[in-house]
Amino acid sequence: MNKVMLIGNVGQEPEVRYVDNDVAVARISLATSERGYTLQNGTQVPDRTDWHTVILWRRLAKTVEEFVHKGDKLYIEGRLRYVSYSDKQGMRRQATEIWAENMEMLSPRRQADEGPSGGVS
């Protein structure tokens, strides 16, 4: 079984493009963090943040385009995909991506029509 579940924060504004027959594809960078801790001997283990590339297709990509922004907290369910490509210098590179099958937005919705005081005009 190839199953990934992540809860993290979007690191930058999503990239959305359209391919064949107006199919939406979104790419987001998602940060997941583990809290640091102190061992019994006093050794400090620092916080650790991992970055994941998440690919979303069709309906999920359109939802990302409309509602997801840098800093939002997301729950992503999907599967791992390994891709290889050539970089600008012609070197062969490999990357790991999460191809999302489900997404839930965990951040509170933003009010588009909030005034400067934070209330609805």
Image: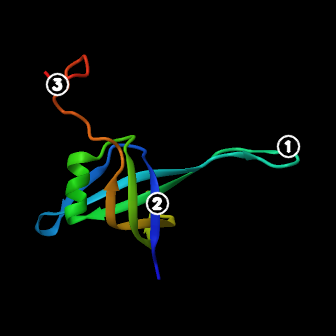
**For residue 102, what is the image quadrant?**
bottom left
Judge from the rendering whether residue 107 lies leftward or rightward of residue 112; answer left or right: right
Q: Residue at x 43, y 65 (%)?
A: 97
**For residue 100, what is the image quadrant?**
bottom left
Q: Which residue is mark 2?
A: 6
Q: In the rendered picture of this protein, how many numbered marks are placed on residues?
A: 3
Judge from the rendering whether residue 114 lies leftward or rightward of residue 29; answer left or right: left
Q: Nearer the viewer, residue 47 or 51?
A: 47
Q: CA distance from mark 3 to mark 2?
A: 34 Å
Which label number is shown at residue 120? 3
Name, please, the residue furthest toward the bottom.
1
Q: Secondary structure at mark 2?
A: strand
Crowding near the residue tagged with mark 1, few <14, some 14–19, many ≥20 C-alpha atoms within 10 Å: few
Vertical order, 104 against 77 (above or below)? above
Image x and y of residue 15, in percent: 30, 51
Counting residues from the start of the chain, the first of labels 3 and 2 encountered is 2
Counting residues from the start of the chain, the first of labels 3 and 1 encountered is 1
Q: Which quadrant, please, contains the C terminus?
A: top left
Q: Residue at x 43, y 58 (%)?
A: 53
Q: CA distance from mark 3 to mark 1?
A: 50 Å
Image x and y of residue 89, in percent: 47, 58
Q: Residue at x 43, y 44 (%)?
A: 11
Vertical order, 25 against 39 (above or below)? below
Which label number is shown at residue 107? none
Crowding near the residue tagged with mark 2, few <14, some 14–19, many ≥20 C-alpha atoms within 10 Å: some
Q: CA distance from mark 2 to mark 1?
A: 30 Å
Which label number is shown at residue 42? 1
Name the amino acid, label 2: Leu
